[in-house]
Amino acid sequence: MTDATMNTTSAHSDFGDYVALLKPRVMSLVVFTAAVGLIVAPGGMNPVLAFASILFIALGAGASGSLNMWWDADIDRIMKRTQSRPVPSGKVSANNAMLVGLWMSVLSVGMLGLASNWLAAGLLAFTIFFYAVVYSMWLKRSTPQNIVIGGAAGAFPPMVGWAAATGSVSIEAIGMFMLIFMWTPPHFWALALFMNEDYSKAGVPMLTVTHGKRTTRNHILAYTILLTPFCIGLAFTSIGGPLYFAMSVILSAMFLQGAVKLYRRVEADAEADKYAAERKVFRFSLFYLFLLFAALLIETALRAFDLHWSAWPQVF
Amino acid sequence: MTDAEIHQRRKKNNIMLGLVLVAFVVLVFSITVAKMMGGANMEAADHVLRPQLIEQ
């Protein structure tokens, strides 16, 4: 796409373009994990307030997405994966993306505070700050550890959901945070393996760009191993149980198997089958997180119907 | 793009924005009702010392 064609659409931004600014796909994962954090928390919450809280957490995530698109418009324009985003494609101006992001941040934090409590609102504000400033502005372009530390932004939603329901942060909330935090690096590095050219063209120092794909494969395996105790450990908190335990063991084994496979692969094989195994691990990692949180939800439902196993050990 | 098409698009965008605003009003009202049913203290400061402001 040339600059000339890019500008022809700039005069007409549709409602949908502003929705796209909020990164609806990322938002769906945020809605899900925040909802699980809120639902598995002890003590009932008024359903209207619970719904509103999840909505404003999602809106906060959208706000940080919009701020990210404003800040990263220059590199989004270069990367194939992000070229069609509203700012690089010229549908929404960068300035409008910033304004939408800032106002939505204020709105979501303020409304979450009113709907639930100010601890949750404060955590949401910190999450937006972490994603928009710490990750997008400071880390993303300066260190290959960008997604390791930046992953914390994506890990906060279940903790915010928990805080909205209980007014506090406990070991279970930290456990859910750690699960997503440790999961993010292998998930993104699997993506970076087959999207490497995009990142290197845009000058984003992903691990694949700075240290090569061999090192990235080693890192994926190491982080997947480190992820496993956090994943299984959550089974022995008040929100876990035998079903979650079984699920976490099976899924961890599958994730580890995938990571080992990526570790053993040489670049020539990967290029020969167009990174089929890497794509598979990336897709599986999404599935992995979704199923683990779904299992936590089922455990809560079982407890609500008094179907849980009371002898289940609660270590943490 | 013709004028008619532009108007058509604007109309659609305005309707969408209107719906979002209405939904927001409904949501704020629902939160208020839910909070009041939960027994939340909804009194704002009116710069006068009322008996209920004194902690027991």
Image (cartoon, coloured by chain):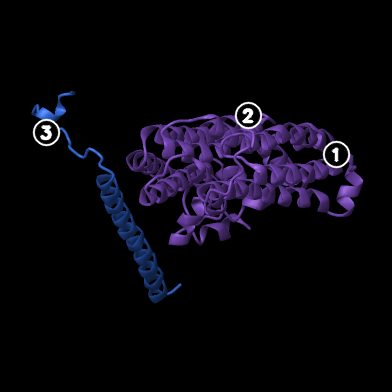
Q: Residue at x 43, y 35 (%)?
A: A125
SS category of the residue bearing label 3:
loop
Asked if the residue under mark 3 is in contact with the one under mark 1, i.e. CB atoms within 8 Å, the reply is no
The x and y percentages for residue A14 are 44, 62
Chain drawn blue, letter?
A: B
Q: Which residue is mark 2?
A: A315
Nearer the observer, disc 1 or disc 3?
A: 3
Residue B46's disc number: 3
Residue A96 % position (x, y): 42, 48
Q: Which mark is residue A150?
A: none
Question: Residue A239 versus residue B24: which sits nearer the camera?
Answer: A239
| Amino acid on which the number 3 mark rests in the picture | Asp
Which hue belongs to chain A?
Answer: purple
Residue A263's disc is: 1
CB-based contact (under 8 Å), mark 3 and mark 2: no
Above or below, comparing residue A185 to residue A14 in the picture: above
A84 left or right, relative to A17: right
User: Where residue A105 sits: x, y (%)?
Assistant: 41, 41
Residue A191, position as x, y percentages in the image: 72, 46
Image vertical order of residue A182 relative to residue A302, above or below: above
Name the quarter where the C terminus of chain B is drawn.
Answer: top left
